[in-house]
Image (spheres, rainbow, N blue to C red):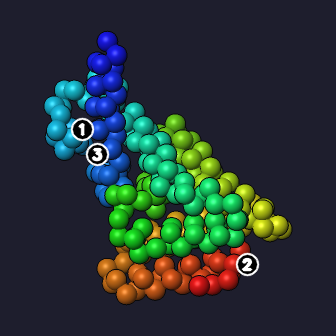
Amino acid sequence: MMEKLSHKARTRQRILDEAAVVMRESGTEGIGVAALMKRAGLTHGGFYAHFESREALVEAVIAEMFTDSAQRFAAITSLADPAERLTQLIDNYLSEHHRNTPGEGCPMPALVSEIAHLPMETRTLFSQRREAVRQRLAQALRELSHPQADDVASSILAEMVGAVALARACPDDAEARNLLAVSRRAVKQRVGLESV
């Protein structure tokens, strides 16, 4: 029995992993159940053994993407020095690598324009996960004794998400690199970190 549960859990994870890549690259509308299952090497009919609907899949994938993103940034978020932690978060988030690998990156730049059109439960989940990211930024700012840590965390998160989304939309690589570089400098200046 445990082996069957383990196999089912592994299969569900495979579906989530494939769907996360598709959603990061193509948005929620990019997920068709039949194509997704084929991509995962599974039959279309098997989908409903793991998810009751496409909407349930989208919600599960959003949760999975935020968890995955937090794990990717775990080494940075565990740094003891708040200035170093914040500097590395800004540099990594606003990097060319993050821009060029949407299938691996933070879900916010990939999905923010679509979230308002999704069911309330999905919007609420997205908002809760976004707030957790904002809180990590605010915590570092509080540790640096920033007088407006919560407000500034909201502002820099919005700028970073927007900068990555715009850089991905930009067809000119040089312009996209410049946009990210300008945002890195501006965000660091705003939070009192030296520009690098």
Q: Return the disc, 3 or 1, that comes first in the chain's sequence.
A: 3
Which callout, 1 or 2, points to the residue nearer the camera? 2
The residue type indicated by label 2 comes to Gly
Q: Regarding mark 3 in the picture, which secondary structure is present there? A: helix
Specify the farthest residue to the top: 1
The residue type indicated by label 1 comes to Val
**In this rendering, is residue 162 above or below 71?**
below
Q: Regarding mark 2 in the picture, which secondary structure is present there? A: loop
Q: Return the disc, 1 or 2, that comes first in the chain's sequence.
A: 1
Q: Tell me where residue 124 sits by quadrant.
A: top right
The residue type indicated by label 3 comes to Glu
**Disc 2 designates what residue?**
192
Q: Residue at x 42, y 59 (%)?
A: 105
Horizontal relation, residue 178 to residue 141: left or right: left
Residue 55 can be seen, yes or no: no
Horizontal relation, residue 47 to residue 88: left or right: left
**Disc 3 designates what residue?**
18
Residue 160 image position (x, y, % from top left): 55, 69
Q: Return the disc, 3 or 2, that comes first in the chain's sequence.
A: 3
Q: CA distance from mark 3 to mark 2?
A: 40 Å
Q: Tell me where residue 37 sits by quadrant.
A: top left
Residue 165 can be seen, yes or no: yes
Horizontal relation, residue 152 to residue 5: left or right: right
**Disc 1 designates what residue?**
33
Q: Residue at x 54, y 41 (%)?
A: 125
Q: Residue at x 29, y 45 (%)?
A: 18
Q: Quadrant of the N terminus?
A: top left
Badge 1: residue crowd in 10 Å (few <14, some 14–19, many ≥20) = some
Specify the farthest residue to the front: 80
**In this rendering, is residue 59 above or below 137?**
above
